[in-house]
């Protein structure tokens, strides 16, 4: 039996085991997917191999550490330096990123988006900003601190920290910070978030499974919003395809993973 896992801190909230096990069970694939609570990201590679994993997903806060841990990084992950999917290929650790395509799948229903504000400057923000830039979508990034903004400047995004924030109009604002994940915080001061919400058509949060304070405020302002569930589904389908090395069809993976969201 093949063993897969998700590494994160926190990780108990993760729906990934349910999603992947639903596919494996329904399609008779001999595999099992579990959670690993990993505090020290530098231990990722040794933990992966000591557990004899065939593959894994990586979540907050280890995605950049996962990039460094890989023997080889392929595709989109290479340009962003952020890995959310790991594959054991003959004892070598191969890294991929399926988050950004998963997110594009999630926002299809909003129609054409030309101008995006990303809140946060972590691994998820990097992946999304680079993916938007690929489609010539204009990206601005707002983070509480300066340190992580230089990457976004280099790839042509407009950047600001809370101190230098200036109010503008956007088609879509995305919260990629972990504010609201295990606390009841907004991704910036209430005043700043309220200003942002009055100047956007759509709002998305990458956190799923709860109405974050950010989405709750968007709801109060009658703005169309969505949480991170569809992004989670999108990245999961693509990760599962990598786990089974295309032995299962994408269509079947999608059908059964989607069903796990009804449980
Ligand atoms: P990182 O740890 O790489 O980055 C976190 C970012 O959030 C940083 O920019 C940090 O700012 C900011 N931040 C953290 N706490 C606060 C706060 N209280 N107020 C304001 N800003 C804050 O995280 P990831 O990018 O890996 O993940 C971010 C979130 O995305 C997580 O909640 C994760 O669960 C979710 N996610 C969901 C996915 C899905 O499929 N739905 C997929 C991927 C991620 P600073 O630089 O100042 O520290």
Image (cartoon, rainbow, N blue to C red):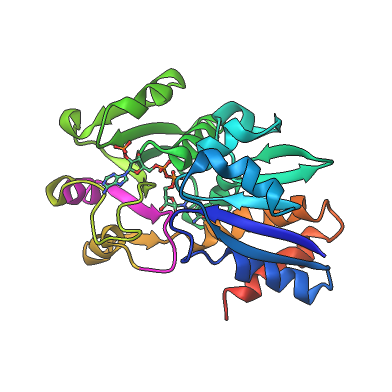
Residue 181: x and y, percent?
35, 59
- Residue 198's place in the image compared with 72, above or below, is below
Residue at the image point whose x is 20% and y is 49% from the top: 193
- Work out whether residue 256 can be spotted: no
Work out which quarter of the rendered image holds the C terminus and state it.
Answer: bottom right
Residue 66: which quarter of the image? top right
Residue 217 appears left or right of 19: left
| Residue closest to the eye, 261 or 19 | 19
- Residue 165's place in the image compared with 211, above or below, is above
Residue 250, magenta (yes or no): no
Residue 248: x and y, percent?
84, 61
Residue 206, magenta (yes or no): yes
Q: Residue furthest right?
A: 247
Residue at the image point whose x is 63% and y is 65% from the top: 34
- Work out whether residue 199 can be spotted: yes
The magenta span reads: 193-210
Work out which quarter of the rendered image holds the N terminus and state it.
Answer: bottom right
Residue at the image point whose x is 67% and y is 68% from the top: 257
Residue at the image point whose x is 64% and y is 43% from the top: 46
Residue 157 appears left or right of 135: left
């Amino acid at each position: 039996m093949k063993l897969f896992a998700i590494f994160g801190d926190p990780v108990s909230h993760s729906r990934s085991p349910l999603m992947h096990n639903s596919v494996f069970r329904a399609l008779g694939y001999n595999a099992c997917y579990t959670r690993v609570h990993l505090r020290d990201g530098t231990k990722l590679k040794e933990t992966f191999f000591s557990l004899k994993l065939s593959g894994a997903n990586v979540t907050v806060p280890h995605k950049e550490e996962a990039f460094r841990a890989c023997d080889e990084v392929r595709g989109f992950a290479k340009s962003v330096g952020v890995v959310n999917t790991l594959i054991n290929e003959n004892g070598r650790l191969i890294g991929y990123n399926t988050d950004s395509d998963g997110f594009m799948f999630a926002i299809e229903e909003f129609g054409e988006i030309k101008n995006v504000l990303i809140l946060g400057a972590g691994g998820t923000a990097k992946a999304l900003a680079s993916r938007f830039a690929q489609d010539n979508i204009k990206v601005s990034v707002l983070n509480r601190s300066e340190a992580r903004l230089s990457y976004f400047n280099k790839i042509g995004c407009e950047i600001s920290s809370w101190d230098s924030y200036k109010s503008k109009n956007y088609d879509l604002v995305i919260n990629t910070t972990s504010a609201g994940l295990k606390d009841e915080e907004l991704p910036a001061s209430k005043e700043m978030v309220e200003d942002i919400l009055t100047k956007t058509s759509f709002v998305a949060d990458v956190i799923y499974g709860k109405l974050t304070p950010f989405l709750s405020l968007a709801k109060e302002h009658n703005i169309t919003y969505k949480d991170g569930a569809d992004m989670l589904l999108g990245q999961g389908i693509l990760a599962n395809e990598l786990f089974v090395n295309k032995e299962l069809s994408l269509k079947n993976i999608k059908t059964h993973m989607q069903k796990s969201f009804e449980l």
